[in-house]
Amino acid sequence: MKWVFSIQPKIKAAFLLAIICVAVLVNMFLERRNISNINDSFSSIYEDRLLPATYVFHLTDHLYQKRLILDRYFNGKTPSNFQADIEQLQVHNNAMDTLIQDFEATYLVEMEGKLLKDLKRGLRAYNDLEWQLMKDLKNATAPEISVDAFEKLFAAAKEELTQLSQIQIEVGKKMKEDSGRMAASTDLLTNLDALLIIVMGLIIQILIFTSKTLVPKAPQHHQLN
C-alpha cells in the first residue's frame, strides 16, 4: 500500500511542474515581445533618427549653396549667367521642399515638430526675399532688400537646423539606452528559462527515482503472510 502514500507528493510535484511550464511559456512570450521591441527600436533609429539627420545635413547644404549664389550679388557683382542662377536657386528650393516633406513623414517629438514648423515659416520668408531680390535685379532696378534682412532669416534657419540635428542625437541616445535595457531584460529572462528547465529536470529525476524505489524487487506471495 506504499503507492497510496506516494500519490500526494506526486500531485504536488505535477502541480509544481505545471507552474514551471507556465512560467517558461510566459518568459518565452516576454522574450519575443522584447526582441520585437528591440527590432522596432533599431528600425526607428534608422527611419526616425538617422534619416532625419541626413535630411538636416542636406537642408543645411542647400541653404549654404543658396547663400553663396546670393553673396555674389550682395558683393556688388552681377554675373553674366543671371538666368542660370535663378534656375539653380529654384533647384535648391525644390530639393529643400522635398527634404522637409520627407522629414515630416518621420516620427517627430514635440520640440522637433515645433522647430520644423518654424523652419518652414522662416524659409518661406527667406525665399520671398530671395525672389524679390532676383526680380529686381532681372528688371535692372535697384534692390530694396537689405543684406541684414537676409542675414537675420539665414541665421534663424541655421540655428533651427542646428537644434534639429541636436535632437536627433539626444533622442537617438535615449532610444539606444532603451534598447540596451530591453536587451538586458531579455538576457535575464533567458537565464530564468534555463534555471526553470534545470529545476524541472531535477523534479522529473526525483519522480523517476522515487517511482523506482516503490517498485518491489521480487514478486510477493500474499498467501505466505
Image (cartoon, helix red, strand yellow):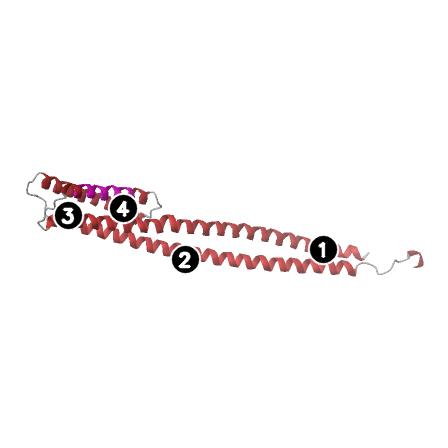
Give percent across and percent down for residue 204: 69, 57
> In terms of depth relative to the viewer, which is nearer, 94 or 200?
94
Q: Earlier in the sequence, mark 2 or mark 3?
A: 3
Residue 50 belongs to magenta span: no
The 10 Å Cα crowd at callout 4, few under 14, some 14 to 19, many 20 or more, is many
Residue 92 belongs to magenta span: yes
Q: Main secondary structure of the magenta part?
A: helix
Give percent across and percent down for residue 61: 24, 50
- Kindly identify the residue that appears in the image at 51 percent across and 56 percent down: 186
Q: Estimate the spatial distance between the alpha carbons at disc 3 and disc 1, rounded to whole Å.
A: 88 Å
Residue located beneath label 4 in the image = 116
Residue located beneath label 1 in the image = 10
Q: Earlier in the sequence, mark 3 or mark 4?
A: 3
Residue located beneath label 3 in the image = 70
The 10 Å Cα crowd at callout 3, few under 14, some 14 to 19, many 20 or more, is many
Amino acid, disc 2: Glu
Q: Hey, which quadrant is residue 101 in on the image?
A: top left
